[in-house]
Structures are given as C-alpha cells and as structure tokens.
Image: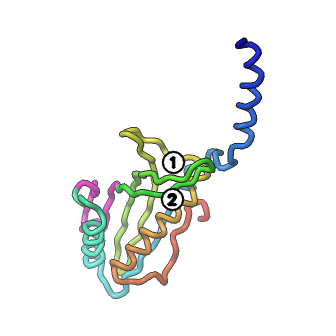
C-alpha cells in the first residue's frame, strides 16, 4: 500500500516545489544592508548627536536597551532595534519581527546611518534575513524609519533616499 502511494506523494512534492515562488531564492547579504544620510543644516555635531539620542528615546520603548554604544566625543551611536515588518512570501502574508543593527555616524550638519544584520525572530529563535521575498519589505521599513528620523531631526523628507549598499 505504501509503495503505491509513494509515486503520488513524490509527484505532489515536486509540483509544490516547482510552483513555489522564485522569491525563495537566497539573496546576497549585501541586499539587506542600507545606508541613508540625514542632513541637519546649521547644527553642529553635538546638536545632531543630541537630536539623534532624542529620536531613539522617542522611537524605542527602552532606548537604554537599544543603544549598545554611544560616544558624543566620537560622534557615534550603535544599537540594535526591533521592528515589525509585513512580509508576503508567496504563500501567506504576515507580520514578522526583525532585529537589526544600526550605526549612526555624526558630524556637523549630518548624520549617516547604516542598517544591517536583519534577523527575524520566532519564539525566541533568530533567523537571518536571506530570501529575496524579504528584500523589498525590509527596504520599505528602512525608508519609513529614515523618513521618521528626518522628520524628528527637523529636516523633512527632501534629501537622499536610503540606498541598498549593492548599488554603490
């Protein structure tokens, strides 16, 4: 009986794999890294640093847990954030929590921020973002974070859009 079902099960399995969306192909890690520049005209590095810290305090529930390293003297804030991103993998649409690394480099009049190291979380386990279907939703989430950052820092949205590092 089992041997009679085996060809049917094999055929159905092959059909399901063949019909799976192409977006399940692994994407290069570089596609998940993004950078943006936030201009703060007329503000010195100290002022940009304080505005960035205020943005982080208002954005994250516990900015002290998010910020891993901060140095006003060196113009650097590095941290790990968590955001919820809607993902459509071709079979089902759902919201996934993603941990990410951000690195803010601050100088007079601007802040350069890098987003990288995206991991989805499920029941405490971490899974690196690695499939093509996740690239665009993560890019959209980064764009939204940068737009909010620009608004909070008082610069509006008229400057450079975040770019995938692969485009550099």
* Disc 1, SS: loop
Q: Secondary structure at mark 2?
A: helix
Quarter of the picture holding the C terminus: bottom right
Q: Residue at x 49, y 81 (%)?
A: 159
Residue 110 visible in this rendered orientation of the protein: yes
Q: Is residue 148 above or below residue 92?
A: below
> Is 87 placed left or right of 23 in the picture?
left
Up the image or down, 67 lies above or below 148; here it is: above
Q: Residues within 10 Å of mark 2 (few under 14, many from 20)?
A: many
Region of the chain picked out in magenta, as a range: 65-80
Provide the major secondary structure of the magenta segment.
Answer: strand
Give yes or no for contact between labels 2 and 1 (Cβ–Cβ under 8 Å).
Answer: yes
Q: Which mark is first along the chain, 1 or 2?
A: 1
Who's the residue at 23% across and 58% down the image?
62
Q: Number of marks in the image? A: 2
Residue drawn at 62 percent across, 45 percent down: 26
Quarter of the image containing the N terminus? top right
Q: Nearer the viewer, residue 152 or 103?
A: 152
Left or right of 139, for residue 83: left
Q: Residues within 10 Å of mark 1 (few under 14, many from 20)?
A: many
In the rendered structure, find residue 138 and report the number of the disc placed on it.
2
Counting from the top left corner in percent of width and height, residue 7 is at: 77, 21
User: Residue 70 at what x, y percent from top left?
Assistant: 26, 61
Q: Nearer the viewer, residue 41 or 82?
A: 82
Question: Is 103 part of what is drawn in magenta?
Answer: no
125 on left or right of 57: right
Query: What's the mark number on residue 129?
Result: 1
> Can you see residue 30?
no
Q: In the picture, residue 39 is in which quadrant?
A: bottom left
């Amino acid at each position: 009986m089992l041997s009679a079902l085996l060809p049917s099960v094999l055929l159905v399995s092959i059909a399901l794999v063949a019909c799976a969306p192409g977006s399940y192909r692994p994407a290069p890690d570089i596609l998940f890294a993004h950078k943006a520049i936030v201009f703060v005209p007329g503000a010195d590095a100290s002022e940009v640093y304080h505005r960035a810290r205020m943005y982080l305090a208002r954005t994250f529930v516990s900015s002290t847990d998010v910020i891993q390293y901060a140095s006003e003297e060196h113009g650097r804030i590095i941290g790990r954030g968590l955001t919820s991103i809607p993902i459509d993998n071709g079979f089902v649409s759902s919201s996934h929590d993603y941990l990410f690394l951000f690195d803010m480099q601050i100088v007079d009049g601007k802040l350069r921020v890098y987003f990288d190291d995206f991991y989805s979380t499920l029941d405490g386990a971490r899974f690196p973002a690695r499939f093509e279907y996740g690239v665009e939703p993560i890019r959209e989430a980064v764009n939204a974070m940068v737009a909010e950052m620009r608004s909070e820092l008082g610069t509006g949205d008229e400057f450079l859009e975040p770019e995938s590092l692969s485009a550099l």
